Image (cartoon, helix red, strand yellow):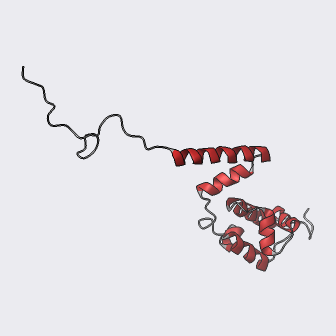
């Protein structure tokens, strides 16, 4: 049985929404807590749903995360935090162990350097379109013997 002080299902749901929005934006609990003037532990309790979020604080959180307030309540599912491809990638990278993150960063650096120095590839077969490919030499026709 739920006591007066234990979190309700809505408290836990809102906490999950805060966590989802924060992770999709690629923001750590610590940096979000700093933005809001909270401790890391308080932010953690909000996300777990063990501490209730006041209406004013919830509005501040929504503004800091750049998501609609109603989305945090689950009342506006169509308008919410739509992660970009880079945000999804950042979220997945954040789930890696620290040594894996370092290896991934090194790999990305090598790939970016390779792209910067890459030469444009010329097609081996000339294009059929006029003005593309190798120009034709008019004097090269079969010779009459």
Q: Quadrant of the C terminus?
A: top left
Q: Indicate left or right for 68 with 135 as reference.
A: right
Residue 33, picture quadrant? bottom right
Instruction: Give the vertical position of 83 relative to 123 (above or below).
Output: below
Residue pictured at 77% horizontal, 68% vertical = 32
Question: In the image as oriented, which residue stretches furthest toward the top?
Answer: 145
The reply to whether residue 87 is in sight is yes
How far across and down, in percent of the image, does residue 9 sit?
Answer: 80, 64
For the image, the number of numbered tags is: 0
Residue 6, picture quadrant? bottom right
The reply to whether residue 10 is in sight is no
How far across and down, in percent of the image, does residue 17 sit?
Answer: 73, 63
Question: In the image as oriented, which residue stretches furthest toward the bottom?
Answer: 56
Residue pictured at 77% horizontal, 73% vertical = 35
* 69 or 92, nearer to the observer: 92
Residue 45, picture quadrant? bottom right
Residue pictured at 65% horizontal, 52% vertical = 89
Q: Quadrant of the N terminus?
A: bottom right
Q: Indicate left or right for 103 with 50 as reference.
A: left
How far across and down, in percent of the image, does residue 73 sit?
Answer: 71, 69
How far across and down, in percent of the image, does residue 123 sit?
Answer: 36, 38
* 2 or 53, nearer to the observer: 53
* 93 or 24, nearer to the observer: 93
């Amino acid at each position: 049985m739920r006591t007066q002080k234990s979190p309700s299902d809505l408290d836990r749901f809102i906490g999950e929404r805060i966590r989802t929005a924060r992770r999709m934006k690629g923001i750590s609990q610590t940096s979000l807590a700093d933005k809001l003037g909270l401790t890391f532990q308080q932010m953690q309790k909000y996300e777990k749903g063990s501490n209730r979020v006041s209406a004013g604080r919830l509005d501040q959180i929504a503004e800091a995360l750049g998501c609609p307030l109603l989305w945090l309540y689950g009342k506006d599912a169509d308008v919410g935090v739509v992660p970009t491809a880079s945000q999804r990638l950042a979220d997945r990278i954040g789930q890696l162990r620290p040594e894996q993150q370092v290896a991934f960063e090194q790999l990305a650096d090598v790939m970016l350097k390779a792209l910067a120095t890459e030469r444009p590839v010329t097609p081996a077969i000339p294009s059929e379109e006029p003005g593309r490919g190798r120009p034709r030499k008019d004097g090269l026709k079969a010779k009459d013997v």
